[in-house]
Image: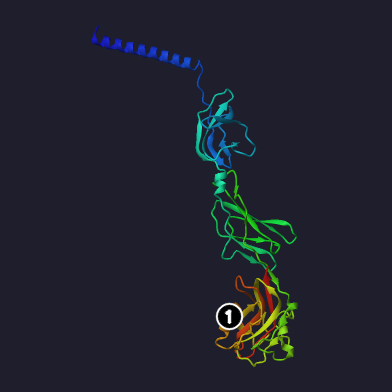
């Protein structure tokens, strides 16, 4: 046999052996599959999850394979599963299932598509899905009120509440209060806003607030803080009863210009700047600073606001002090109002400086001021006039005084 023939013979032999081997392998493969062809249906697409409170929504875009009959979702290392029909809901481009009764833990899920013949798609895994519950809720806190300026009572009686800024996981805060119809009412403060108005709020009734959060942007559930908290006490301002005001005449008090311009003109209920003689007008015998004193007729524990209205011209106070005391016994100052030691003398006698006012205008129009925070009980008021708009050194006049108590 020639060398060429030998090579040809070897090639033929190798091909024969290879064909035989392939035939044997193919038969063994078919025997292993019971002579059935292995078929993988089309897999679902874009499997995602929305975590919730002890539950999760697993959702995906349906498999494009028209033979898909259902899907199976596994978790807990395939110890638990749920079957989801491959039925599409009109108007939705995804299929979903909600899996309840889960522990607060991090889970992995596996989704298979199953066709009409029972063939199963390759697995599609979804890992590191965190489920939330009592532990997460227990770490939540209610949004903080603005402690520096928590509320503002509006002229119509509504109350504006102020809160500190919060983070984006906060989805809102629900405020509960009582309105003037003695009904429970609610207001909602969104994460984007720092203020909310309580409409028709009933004075002196408690206000509670409770915030809600989401653990992640697309969370299935919202978590409310375990307990509501009480908002700082809201005091509304109630006009003091002028019908029980009465004039006093303590040592060194300034006297009226004439009987028609007595101090009682300051609480006769007039509105707007008044003309002479419907005003209080001093007689000019006491140099500035000088003071007058009156009795409000009742003790007010939270005197909060004062409003002065000047005369339609002339000697309206532009700089003045407001003093208060609960009991006038022994409170008479022993030096005139323009004495350098007057302030020290007033403090020693138990008077409290409620406000030191400076107006930048002519003093005519109504001018409202807030008195000191957390004042002592006050029944008696002393106004010490230091400067008037006209520049006069002895005369002062006013049309009206009003006070409001916080309650």
Seen in the image, is 267 located left or right of residue 358? Answer: right
Identify the residue at horizontal 72%, vertical 91% (top origin).
258
Counting from the top left corner in percent of width and height, residue 238 is at 70, 70
Q: Nearer the viewer, residue 83 or 250?
A: 250
Residue at the spot 47% in from the left edge and 16% down from the top edge: 32
Instruction: Identify the image quadrant of residue 332.
Output: bottom right
Residue 108 in percent (x, y) is at 51, 35
State left or right for residue 31 relative to residue 200.
left
Location of residue 179 with respect to 104 vertically, above or below: below
Q: Quadrant of the C terminus?
A: bottom right
Residue 366 in view: no
Judge left or right: residue 342 versus residue 307. Answer: left
- Categorize mark 1 by other alpha carbons within 10 Å: few (<14), some (14-19), many (20+): some
- Asked if residue 21 shows in the view, the reply is yes
Q: Residue placed farthest to the top in the image?
A: 1
Is residue 19 positioned above or below 171 on the image?
above
Residue 323, x across and y down, in percent? 62, 79
Callout count: 1
Which residue is disc 1 drawn over? 347
- Name the quadrant of the N terminus: top left
The residue nearer to you, when weighing 314 against 162, is: 162
Q: Quadrant of residue 400?
A: bottom right
Report the residue at 73% width, 57% height from top: 183
User: Image check: 21 left or right of 386?
Assistant: left
The x, y position of residue 251, in whole percent, is: 65, 88
């Amino acid at each position: 046999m020639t060398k060429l023939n030998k090579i040809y013979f070897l090639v033929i032999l190798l091909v024969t052996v290879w064909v035989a081997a392939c035939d044997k392998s193919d038969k063994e493969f078919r025997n292993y599959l019971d002579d059935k062809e292995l078929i993988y249906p089309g897999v679902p697409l874009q499997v995602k999850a929305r975590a919730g409170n002890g539950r999760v929504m697993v959702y995906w875009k349906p498999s494009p394979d028209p033979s898909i009959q259902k899907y199976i979702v596994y978790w807990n290392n395939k110890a638990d599963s749920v079957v989801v029909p491959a039925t599409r809901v009109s108007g939705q481009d995804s299929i979903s299932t909600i899996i309840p009764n889960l522990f607060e833990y991090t889970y992995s899920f596996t989704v298979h598509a199953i066709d009409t013949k029972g063939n199963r798609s390759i697995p599609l895994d979804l890992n590191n899905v965190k489920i939330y519950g009592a532990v997460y809720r227990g770490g939540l806190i209610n949004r903080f009120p603005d402690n520096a300026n928590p509320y503002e009572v509006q002229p119509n009686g509504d109350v504006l509440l102020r809160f500190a800024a919060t983070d984006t996981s906060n989805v809102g805060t629900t405020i509960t209060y009582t309105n003037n119809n003695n009904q429970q009412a609610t207001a909602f403060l969104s994460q984007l806003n720092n203020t909310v108005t309580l409409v028709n709020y009933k004075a002196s009734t408690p206000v509670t607030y409770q915030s809600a959060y989401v653990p992640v942007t697309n969370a299935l559930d919202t978590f409310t803080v375990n307990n509501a908290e009480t908002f700082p006490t809201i005091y509304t301002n109630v006009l003091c009863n002028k019908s029980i005001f009465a004039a006093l005449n303590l040592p060194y008090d300034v006297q009226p210009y004439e009987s028609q311009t007595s101090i009682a003109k300051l609480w006769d209920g007039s509105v707007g700047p008044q003309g002479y003689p419907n005003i209080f007008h001093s007689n000019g015998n006491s140099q500035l600073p000088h003071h007058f004193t009156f009795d409000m007729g009742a003790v007010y524990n939270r005197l909060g606001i004062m409003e002065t209205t000047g005369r339609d011209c002339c000697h309206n106070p532009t700089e003045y002090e407001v003093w208060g005391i609960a009991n006038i016994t022994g409170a008479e100052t022993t030096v005139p109002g323009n004495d350098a030691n007057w302030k020290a003398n007033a403090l020693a006698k138990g008077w409290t400086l409620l406000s030191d006012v400076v107006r930048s205008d002519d003093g005519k129009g109504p001018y409202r001021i807030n008195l000191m925070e957390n004042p002592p009980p006050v029944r008696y008021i002393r106004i010490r006039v230091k400067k008037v708009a006209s520049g006069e050194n002895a005369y002062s006049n006013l049309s009206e005084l009003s006070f409001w108590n916080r309650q």
